[in-house]
Amino acid sequence: MHPMTAQPVPSHPHGAMRRDEREITDKAEIDEILRAAKVMYLALADGDMPFVVPVFYAWDGAALYFHSAKAGTKIDIIKKNPKVCFAISTEQGVVESDIICNFEAKHRTVIGFGQALFIEAEPEKIAALDLIVARFSDKAWQYPAENLRATRVLRIDVTDIKGKKHGF
């Protein structure tokens, strides 16, 4: 069953998890990872050309938010294809072994899929920016009108998500 929806897990582009003992099925643990990390690696597809970019983000328990300049490669790609994949990872490190080929990554990772949507309404845009900024500062900020006009804010409506951990 899918940990976020209690529905059967659909097939994934990357296939079923080979080492199911490493799968994180607890929604609370997935939420913990999404709230702990600061950087999301956002994967986009421009035709048959992949594009990955790191972005600061916020998670509100249902959707992910990130901001961007008004123009650029990721914005151009999302306008053509709003389907995204994302990876968020915490506690990276190495699980060493006496055999070099048996070293493994120590991590807790969430990978998901969704649809990116441009937020146009100023109140929702400000609320999303407040979520992102709150991850880095306790100060309440005001956004100058010209900065708001120059900033895109996007919401990722998550359609599928799964977690994996190793070394814990």
Image (tube, grey):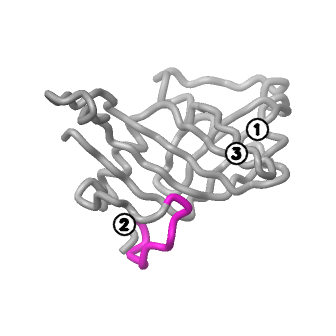
Image quarter of residue 153: top right
| Amino acid carrying mark 2 in the image | Pro
Residue 26 visible, this orientation: no
> Helix, strand, or loop for circle 1?
helix
Nearer the camera: disc 1 or disc 3? 1
Q: Which residues are magenta?
A: 3-14
Residue found at x 56% / y 64%: 159
| Amino acid carrying mark 1 in the image | Lys
Magenta region's main secondary structure? loop
Identify the mark nearer the N-term, 3 or 2: 2
In the image, which disc is placed on residue 74? 1
What residue is pinned by disc 3? 154
> Helix, strand, or loop for circle 3?
strand
> Disc 3, disc 2: CB below 8 Å?
no
In the image, which disc is placed on residue 3? 2
Residue found at x 51% / y 54%: 112
- Which quarter of the image is occupied by the N terminus? bottom left
Identify the mark nearer the N-term, 2 or 1: 2
Q: Is residue 163 above or below residue 73?
A: below
Q: Is residue 55 above or below residue 15?
A: above
Task: Based on the picture, tell me whether residue 61 belongs to the magenta stretch.
Answer: no
| Amino acid carrying mark 3 in the image | Leu
Residue found at x 41% / y 58%: 162
Q: Residues within 10 Å of mark 3 (few under 14, many from 20)?
A: many
Residue found at x 73% / y 49%: 45
